[in-house]
Image (spheres, helix red, strand yellow):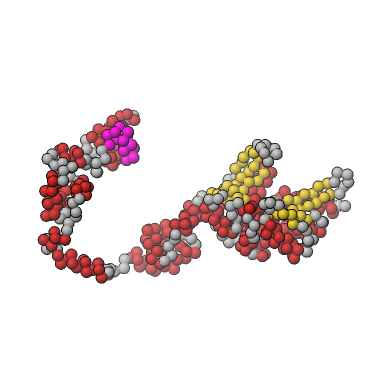
Amino acid sequence: MNKEERDNQIIELYRSGLGSPTISKKLGISKSTVLSILKMRNILDKTRVNGFSFNKFIETNIGKLSKDDKNDWMEVYDYYLREGSFNKLQEYLGINKTIVFRLFKKFGFKSLPEEVFRKRGLQDSLETKKIKKESGYKVKREKSDLRIKLEKNTDVIKNLYLDKKWSASKVGEYLGVNQRSIREYVKELGIGRSYKEAMAVFSRNSCNYTNIDFFENIDTEEKAYWLGFIYADGNVDKNKTLLTIGLKDVDENHLLKFSKIFGKRLEKRELKKYKNIKSNRVVVYCRIGNKYLCETLTGKGVEPRKTYKDSIEILNHIPDYLLRHFIRGLFDGDGCVHINKHKNCDTFCSRVTYLSNKSLIDKIKSIFREELDLNNVRVYNKKYYSSIQYGSDKDIRRLYNYMYDDANVYLERKRDIFDSYFKYRDNL
């Protein structure tokens, strides 16, 4: 059956009195498709309800009644008052009760008053209902098996829902209970989630990435290093939904270490020579779109447009014994090491530079002074960042040992420059 034949069949069935749900089931197509075709052909009757039409009903079933004349429907309303039921009225007229209800509403006919109940001998029950409603009376019921099960597992629900941040559906699946019951029960316990909290949990549990809570607690070398690297060279967008890290293609293997943590593939993009880009180059990107991960990072201090903010809040989330790994990540992301040979002799000019905001650079400088006894170097303050540089052989060796002793994660390219410098110095 082609499209034209299908459309003609839909129109034919609709004119025969069938509604759009019935037509969609009969032809095996969606209800929205049926409605769109009827609208497009300008034959959709908006007064129809469940396959019935006001106009068709008036013409065929009760030809004398007009849907615009209130007086014609007074007899029908009187019958409704006598019987007190829309269901009986539906049988009496032979049409859908929804149509009659809508006409009653149009004409301003009210639902059954109390006098009707009194005439039918229901005065006592009506007054009893009023007393119960005013007094706040509630019928006592025996606890269902579901209620008993929820109360028995209250501690388990609190642990999974609050501590482990499981969704209601996941908790329900674990206990063999539907998620709606879990949602209602946690609200009753006073531990329900706000919309923002619920969206964060949804983002955490519904993504396709692994280890999405990687930065929740900084307690390993790897976490401290990558937090420093992201703080230096990563970016969280203003909506806090996308984390991006971009490196030159020569450092692709290093970025691959990070992407494997989350099970994410890398993207490559060629940047052509333009304005501040001096020459064509290939950049490797790792993009992770997850609100929970980004909000975890912003909570640690990795905020959007962090370059323009002078803060050391991030250090509050890193234990002292992991601080050197964070500094190594910061150095690999934004620092640099230069070992240049002089033109007219065999000596080398060495320089190790750390870049960040002013407060963080001042803090790093004080750490180096206290723990490594490095020279009291000058802090270079620029518009959006500050830097410190170390050039003596003693300082460079101490920095190398501080950052790389027992280290498992680092940018090989920068460490190789250090190794080449030491190799030259040791052979002098």
In the rendered view, does 297 fall on the left or right side of 99?
right
> Can you give x and y, in whole percent of width and height, for residue 20 in the image?
28, 40
Residue 161 visible, this orientation: yes
Picture residue at 13% right of the left edge, 62% below the top: 118
**Tag count:** 0
In the rendered view, does 54 fall on the left or right side of 343?
left
Q: Is residue 184 above or below residue 342?
A: below
Residue 174 visible, this orientation: no
Picture residue at 67% right of the left edge, 61% below the top: 323
Q: Quadrant of the N terminus?
A: top left
The residue nearer to you, when weighing 154 against 62, is 62
The residue nearer to you, when weighing 269 against 151, is 269
Q: Quadrant of residue 29?
A: top left
- Magenta-drawn stretch contains 30: yes
Picture residue at 21% right of the left edge, 66% below the top: 129
- Magenta-drawn stretch contains 285: no
Q: Is residue 116 above or below residue 265?
A: below
Q: Which residues are magenta?
A: 27-44
> Can you give x and y, in whole percent of width and height, for residue 214 in the image?
57, 57
In the rendered view, does 298 fall on the left or right side of 388?
left
The residue nearer to you, when weighing 173 against 362, is 362
Picture residue at 41% right of the left edge, 66% below the top: 190
Q: Main secondary structure of the magenta part?
A: helix
Q: Is residue 381 above or below residue 9?
A: below
> Can you give x and y, in whole percent of width and height, for residue 24 in the image?
30, 39
In the rendered view, does 102 fall on the left or right side of 62?
right
> Can you give x and y, in whole percent of width and height, for residue 59 in the image?
16, 37
